[in-house]
Image (cartoon, coloured by chain):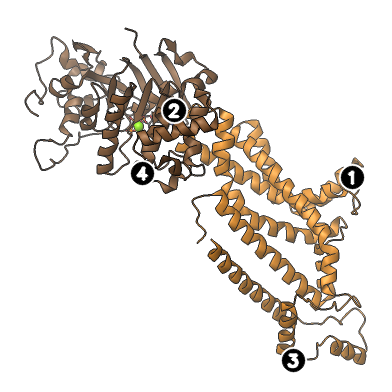
Chain colours: A brown, B orange
């Protein structure tokens, strides 16, 4: 089957006055039609920039310097602005982290939601308004006709994120990229928004890429997970395998930071000690080596390749080399 | 909303009253009177004149009388021009000022905003540099210097525009540039920095992510937000044009209220100075009120309460 999205060796850099910030340093992954893929990793690991590269939404000093991004067989890296305008909001849409700042404060909600519908679906204003109202009720906004006459500041954070979701889904995109859609929200609202996304996923057959810091969140929604670190993909696996048979110490660290749902008291989160790598001068070897408990000599000098572990499961860690000492995940099946 | 406006109107009256009072007493505290000219008048003549205009009465009584007439909209007689009232002076000379002033405001808004947009969209390129050099010159060169240069170039050297007078549209061009030059530069800078700031906002990224064209993103999503600070600048802008008119009208020989006002001051025409000051203040207060209401319409987050 043809992949919906295939990213090959993507490298994206920002050219700043202090030098080239290598935000994404060679990332490859794919997405099947209808699939929900999770992307996790600490702040600064390049999750957002990978997605911005796909949408070609990079700021002026950012540039894709290598790689291909095939979307339905079309290479987006080579697409011009005009072609991207037809794809954005139509085939691929995106929801951002902060719903408080993601809507235009001086335009009515109705104007903002109908915009992509009028642009991509060739509808007139009246039809677009009807469709927008339908989308708003789908995401659980009561009396949508009235709400469309209001401005963003008359909506709460959770409501605004619902508006963003309705807007993103208004043109039936084939791919929805949600970049930490719940991080800026209260815990209870977070749960509601996630519930909504799961529900919509069953109703609308859209592929999803969900970015988050929180492994607990992805486990709930996604069937497959990419773990990113220092601008690289360090592990990719089906959700189950990642939780119970992870092969990368960084993933173990992330798993250690997830509160255990079985103990009633929220365990103190164990952050991973140390600093993420400097992307101006990325280390020669494994980017995680300076913070890793199991560092070997080779880790400091050679960047680990993606070792094939199993079906859909790859990990970039020298521990998976056949000559490496046997160390296994502290998180095993049955733990949870 | 109407509650807010009533409150604002009340506050405006207080402001005006303070301006009137301060001007009145300051003027009377100045040494010399309206009849102290180059030639000294005979004492008897001077005393007669002072009686005629009530200047011999105790100062508080003069003040009370002035306020009473003011409430009726009567600004009193001119002391220097026989038989003319201050109301007539304003009625006669304000239209010329208003014409030049509105052309200057329009000019500084349209050109200033345009320059600001061009500069922001070409940040760091030559268009940006050019606009900002012009804008820097505009805020540093005083209007009388600018006026002189304009006359030198367009009237004396190129012989394109008439240097003085107020006969037709050609007469408007140089005074409007001289009057609006500062505001234009200020607006250009404000538009540029405001637009650059708005372009980095999340909602602009959202607009691009929806697949909107660059033109729609800039003109529908960014500009509306970027122009909000410009609206707040409208009050000072109008005030600047008013005060600028004192000099510029004199240079270009425009029979406007600004030139008249300067004349009144040199003449120590108490009644005219008071009257024109009150008129200017009322005008500014009303402009500011209108701007504030306008502001609430442009930015839906502002509630007039
Ligand atoms: N405009 C920019 N100029 C320079 N560097 C940038 C720019 N945008 C991002 N970066 C750098 O790129 C790196 C990756 O950023 P990215 O936003 O992808 O991280 P992330 O994984 O999404 O983190 P978070 O979880 O905080 O959102 C960061 O180190 C950041 O400093
Ligand atoms: Mg991010």
- Circle 1 marks a residue in which chain? B
Name which quarter of the figure residue A162 lies in.
Answer: top left
Residue B207 in the image: above or below residue A142:
above
Q: Nearer the viewer, residue A162 or A52?
A: A162
CA gap, disc 4 and disc 2: 37 Å
CA gap, disc 1 and disc 3: 52 Å
Q: Which residue is mark 2?
A: A19
Does the beta carbon at disc 3 come under 8 Å from ligand 1? no
Name which quarter of the figure residue A73 lies in.
Answer: top left
Who's the residue at 73% across and 88% down the image? Answer: B59
Answer few, some or many: residues within 10 Å of disc 4's Cα (few below 14, many 20 plus, some between 14 and 19): many
CA gap, disc 4 and disc 3: 66 Å
Q: Earlier in the sequence, mark 1 or mark 3?
A: 3
Query: Label 2's element?
Result: strand
CA gap, disc 1 and disc 4: 59 Å
CA gap, disc 3 and disc 2: 78 Å
Q: Which residue is mark 4?
A: A157
Name which quarter of the figure residue A36 lies in.
Answer: top left
Depth check, mark 1 against mark 3: the one in front is 3
Answer few, some or many: residues within 10 Å of disc 3's Cα (few below 14, many 20 plus, some between 14 and 19): few
Same subunit, labels 1 and 3: the answer reads yes
- Circle 2 marks a residue in which chain? A
Q: Which residue is mark 3?
A: B58
Q: Where residue A304 sits in the image (x, y, percent)?
A: 24, 15
Q: Which residue is mark 1?
A: B161
Same subunit, labels 2 and 1: the answer reads no
Same subunit, labels 3 and 2: the answer reads no
């Amino acid at each position: 089957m043809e992949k919906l999205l295939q990213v090959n060796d993507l490298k994206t850099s920002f050219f700043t006055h202090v030098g080239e910030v290598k935000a994404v340093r060679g990332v490859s992954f794919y997405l099947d039609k209808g699939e929900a893929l999770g992307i996790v990793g600490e702040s600064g690991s390049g999750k957002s920039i990978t997605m911005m590269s796909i949408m070609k939404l990079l700021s002026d000093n950012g540039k894709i310097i290598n790689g291909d991004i095939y979307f339905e067989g079309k290479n987006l890296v080579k697409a011009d602005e005009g072609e991207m305008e037809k794809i954005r909001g139509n085939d691929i849409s995106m929801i951002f982290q902060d719903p408080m700042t993601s809507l235009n404060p001086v335009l009515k909600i109705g104007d903002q939601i109908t915009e992509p519908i009028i642009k991509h679906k060739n509808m007139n204003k009246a039809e677009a308004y009807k469709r927008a109202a339908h989308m708003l009720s789908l995401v659980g906004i009561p009396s949508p006709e009235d709400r469309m006459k209001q401005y963003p500041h008359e909506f709460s954070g959770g409501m605004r994120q619902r508006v963003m979701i309705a807007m993103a889904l208004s043109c039936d995109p084939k791919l929805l990229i949600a970049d930490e859609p719940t991080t800026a929200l209260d815990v209870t609202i977070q749960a509601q928004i996630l519930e909504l996304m799961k529900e919509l996923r069953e109703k609308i057959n859209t592929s999803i890429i969900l970015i988050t810091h929180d492994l607990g969140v992805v486990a709930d929604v996604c069937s497959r997970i990419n773990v990113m670190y220092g601008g690289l993909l360090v592990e990719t696996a089906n959700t189950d395998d990642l939780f119970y048979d992870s092969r990368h110490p960084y993933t173990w660290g992330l798993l250690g930071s997830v509160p255990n749902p079985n103990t009633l008291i929220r365990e103190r989160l164990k952050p991973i000690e140390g600093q993420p790598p400097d992307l101006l001068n990325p280390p020669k070897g494994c980017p995680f080596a300076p913070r890793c408990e199991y560092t070997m000599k080779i880790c400091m000098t050679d960047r680990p390749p993606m070792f094939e572990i199993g079906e859909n499961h790859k990990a970039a860690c020298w521990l998976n080399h056949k000559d490496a000492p046997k160390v296994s995940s502290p998180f095993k099946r049955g733990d949870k | 909303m109407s509650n807010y406006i009533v409150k604002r109107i009340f506050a405006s009256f207080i402001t005006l009253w303070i301006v009137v009072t301060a001007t009145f007493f300051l003027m009377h505290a100045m040494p010399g009177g309206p009849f102290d000219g180059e030639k000294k008048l005979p004492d008897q003549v001077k005393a007669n004149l002072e009686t005629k205009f009530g200047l011999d009465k105790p100062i508080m009584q003069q003040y009370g009388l002035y306020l009473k007439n003011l409430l009726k909209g009567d600004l009193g007689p001119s002391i220097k021009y026989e038989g003319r009232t201050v109301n007539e002076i304003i009625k006669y000379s304000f239209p010329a000022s208003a014409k030049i002033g509105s052309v200057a405001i329009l000019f500084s808004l349209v050109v200033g905003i345009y320059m600001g947009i061009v500069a922001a969209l070409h940040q760091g390129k030559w268009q940006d540099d050019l606009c900002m050099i012009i804008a820097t010159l505009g805020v540093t060169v005083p209007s009388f210097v600018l006026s002189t240069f304009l006359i030198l170039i367009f009237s004396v050297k190129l012989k394109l525009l008439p240097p003085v007078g107020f006969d037709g549209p050609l007469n408007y061009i140089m005074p409007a540039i001289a009057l609006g030059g500062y505001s234009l530069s200020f607006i250009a800078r404000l538009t540029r920095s405001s637009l650059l700031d708005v372009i980095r906002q999340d909602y602009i990224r959202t607009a691009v992510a929806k697949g909107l064209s660059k033109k729609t993103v800039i003109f529908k999503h960014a500009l509306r937000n970027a122009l909000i600070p410009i609206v707040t600048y409208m009050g000072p802008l109008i005030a600047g044009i008013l005060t600028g008119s004192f000099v510029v009208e004199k240079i270009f020989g425009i029979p406007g209220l600004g030139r008249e006002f300067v004349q009144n001051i040199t003449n120590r025409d108490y009644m005219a100075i008071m009257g024109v000051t009150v008129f200017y203040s009322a005008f500014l207060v009303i402009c500011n009120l209108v701007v504030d209401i306008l502001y609430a319409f442009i930015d839906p987050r502002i509630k007039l309460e």
